Amino acid sequence: MEVVKRNLISIVCGAVALLAMIVPFFPLGGSVSDLNSGLEQSDRALREAEDLYSRSHQLPIIDPKKREADELKLFPTRSVIDIGKQVVRDIETQSSGMVEKAMGRNVHQPIGGNMVFPNLRGGGRAANGFKQEYYRALDQIMRDMRATTPPTAEDEKNLADSIWLKEWKPKALNPQVEQDLLNQFNLTVVP
């Protein structure tokens, strides 16, 4: 008994150490698995935060002329994120407005309104009226486009002859120079 009194603290410490080694092997109602799942979630959150911190961040591209995004120097605050989201919404609105406007201009009405195509083989008044309406609409399209009929080969030849006579031939001092100029003219001017 005397030994127990003198070593009471050592005995209590030994008993606590023995209990600490035995307790993990007793089921504690799933608290160990809960602790392990909490540890895995914390580890996953830490990896995500480290990835977010180490990743390079870019500013959004809002200028259509730029191809590459500028690097973001500071981590964005909530107000900067809200401004960025507003810019993206504005660009979406402008883009959808442009698409709607383009679709509105891309509406094609049939020539002659909603009239049914006449039997053109039989000729007559209906065929003639449709032909006149067709040519009127074609002329209007050409006026709208400020277009003309393409030049013919004869038109191109006449223009080339005119340029030769007005600009190139007067530079010729003798027949040899004239032939050299004609060769150069044919290479550079004539299509």
Image (spheres, grey):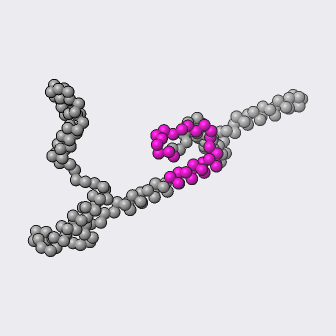
Query: Is 63 covered by the magenta stretch?
Result: yes
Q: Nearer the viewer, residue 190 or 8?
A: 190
Q: Position of residue 146 (x, y in %)?
A: 30, 55
Tell me what residue is drawn at x 18 percent, y 40 percent. 161
Residue 92 inside the magenta-drawn segment = no
Note whether 132 is above or below 54 in the view shown. below
Report the span colored magenta.
Answer: 62-91
Q: Determine the residue positioned at 22% across, 68% down.
A: 133
Quarter of the figure with residue 57: top right
Could you say where residue 178 lies in the image, as x and y percent from the top left?
17, 29
On screen, 84 above or below 14? Answer: below
Give whichever of 172, 42 is nearer the camera: 172
Residue 135, by quadrant, is: bottom left
Q: Nearer the viewer, residue 174 or 155?
A: 174
Picture quarter with the C terminus: top left
Percent x, y of residue 127: 15, 70
